[in-house]
Structure formats: C-alpha cells, structure tokens
C-alpha cells in the first residue's frame, strides 16, 4: 500500500484518509483543508526543532490547548471529530506496521507529531467540546445527546436511557430500572387496574386453562407456561 519515498507515503496516507471520509459530513473539502493545515503546522514544527530528537517532542510548546482547539472544534462537531479521530488512529496504526517506513526521519517525526496531537486531544477533549459524562456508564457525550434523569440529578446517555432506565409516569422523570424506590405500579389503584381480570373473579383454574404448550423445534422436549 505504501511505497518507500516519504513524499509518496504521505500522499498515500492523505488519499486513503480522504477516500475514507468521502461520503461523510462535513464535506471532503473540510478534511482536505484540515490536512493541509495540519501538514503546515507539522512542517513549521519540524523547522523550529531542527534537532528534534526522534523520540521526544516538546509537546506543550507546539501542541498546546489552542492548537488542539484549532484542529478540532473549528472543523468538527464532537461526533464528526470522534469519527475522524478514529480514522487517524487507524492510519497511525497502519504506519507502525511498516517498520521500514518508520526508519525514515520525516515519516517518524510525522508519526510522533500526530501521536502527540492525539494524546493531547484525549486530555483536552472534555473541555474542548464541553462534554458531559454519563452518570450511569461514564462515556463522554455532547450536550445535545444528554438525557436528564431523576429530575436533573443525573445526566445519562441515550443508550443508558434505552437499556437501563424507563420513564416513570407518576413522577414524570427517567428512573433506573432497578431502583426499588420506584415502581411502575407504585399505587394500589394502578396495580388493581393492571390485574383487574384477576379481581373480576378469575381463578387459578381459569389461568390453568389458558396454559399453552409450546413445541420447540428439533427437540422432543415440551415446555409449559402460563400466557
Ligand atoms: Zn451511559
């Protein structure tokens, strides 16, 4: 996939990255501009640190908070960035698989530069995108994807809302499925309404009559249950 000339390698890197982003928002031109600017900053840093040690970059000097802000929030929403960041990690990984390529100083420096950038972003992400973390599972999410539970005492993500929480009508808030302080029938009237057929003279025999037998295919076993 890569050839050995550093110029060719970076061209391939760009092309693959852009092809990967072709059908996504924001437009391809945003990614192109991002890459062009990123290379420009990389080249500036390379000139500034002529004696750049291959294993060490004074990250704080070059890749500071402002740098991170320019290359994230100015181009992307949090979710667009998260997707793009993932691709950058993938391409970094691909570079490491071509060990002989990393023998080339330019490529190695670029790799280090990108790696430092991604590390720093990781530290600043919450602040950069003003993220909340889900009180239930801990993942980060942007404001528009938060759900309020327990009248605002908890902020949860949509996945947790769908899997671990339910809307408790009576108190008009999301509560945890396993929260014993809340129940879907926490009122005797609710309960009676739900089981009114039992109240209206249903007996155990009636229920037994409704018992059906289900045949499970491919085995000779039968299971009985009340339905
Ligand atoms: Zn969650």
Image (spheres, rainbow, N blue to C red):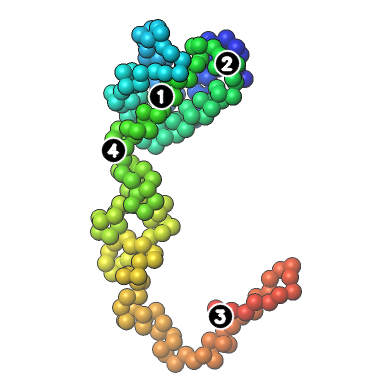
Residue 77 appears in view: no
Label whose residue precedes the other's in the sequence (3 or 2): 2
What is the secondary structure assignment of the residue under circle 2?
helix
- Front label number (4 vs 1): 1
206 displayed left or right of 125: right
Measuring from the top left, give residue 221's x and y in whole percent: 71, 75
What is the secondary structure assignment of the residue under circle 3?
loop
* Residue hosting label 1: 116
Label whose residue precedes the other's in the sequence (1 or 3): 1
* Residue hosting label 3: 226
- Label 3: how many Cα within 10 Å (few below 14, some 14–19, many 20+): few
- Label 4: how many Cα within 10 Å (few below 14, some 14–19, many 20+): few
Report the front residue among 191 and 4.
4
Measuring from the top left, give residue 95's x and y in whole percent: 55, 22
Hey, which quadrant is residue 179 in on the image? bottom left
* Residue hosting label 2: 101
What is the secondary structure assignment of the residue under circle 4?
loop
Residue sitting at x 38%, y 60% = 165
- Label 2: how many Cα within 10 Å (few below 14, some 14–19, many 20+): some
Q: Give the CA separation, mark 4 to mark 3.
A: 51 Å
Label whose residue precedes the other's in the sequence (4 or 1): 1
Is the CB of mark 2 within 8 Å of ligand 1? no
What is the secondary structure assignment of the residue under circle 1?
helix
Q: Give the CA separation, mark 1 to mark 2.
A: 19 Å
188 displayed left or right of 203: left
Report the front residue among 212 and 143.
143
* Residue hosting label 4: 130
């Amino acid at each position: 996939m890569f050839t050995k000339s550093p110029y060719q390698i970076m061209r391939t890197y760009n092309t693959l990255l852009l092809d990967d982003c072709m059908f996504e928002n924001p437009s391809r031109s945003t990614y192109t501009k991002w890459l062009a600017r990123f290379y420009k900053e990389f080249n500036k840093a390379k000139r500034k640190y002529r004696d750049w040690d291959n294993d060490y970059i004074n990250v704080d000097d070059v890749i500071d908070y402002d740098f991170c802000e320019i290359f994230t929030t100015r181009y992307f929403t949090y979710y667009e960035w998260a997707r793009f960041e993932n691709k950058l990690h993938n391409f970094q990984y691909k570079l490491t698989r071509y060990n002989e390529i990393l023998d080339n100083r330019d490529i190695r420096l670029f790799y280090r530069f990108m790696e430092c950038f991604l590390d720093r972003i990781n530290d600043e992400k919450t602040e950069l995108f003003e993220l909340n973390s889900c009180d239930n599972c801990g993942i980060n999410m942007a404001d528009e994807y938060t759900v309020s539970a327990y009248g605002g005492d908890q902020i949860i993500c949509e996945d947790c809302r769908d899997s671990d929480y339910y809307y408790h009508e009576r108190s008009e808030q999301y509560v945890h499925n396993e929260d014993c302080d809340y129940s879907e029938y926490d009122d005797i009237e609710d309960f009676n309404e739900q089981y009114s057929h039992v109240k209206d003279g249903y007996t155990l025999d009636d229920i037994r009559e409704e018992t059906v037998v289900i045949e499970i295919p491919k085995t000779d076993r039968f299971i009985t249950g009340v339905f």
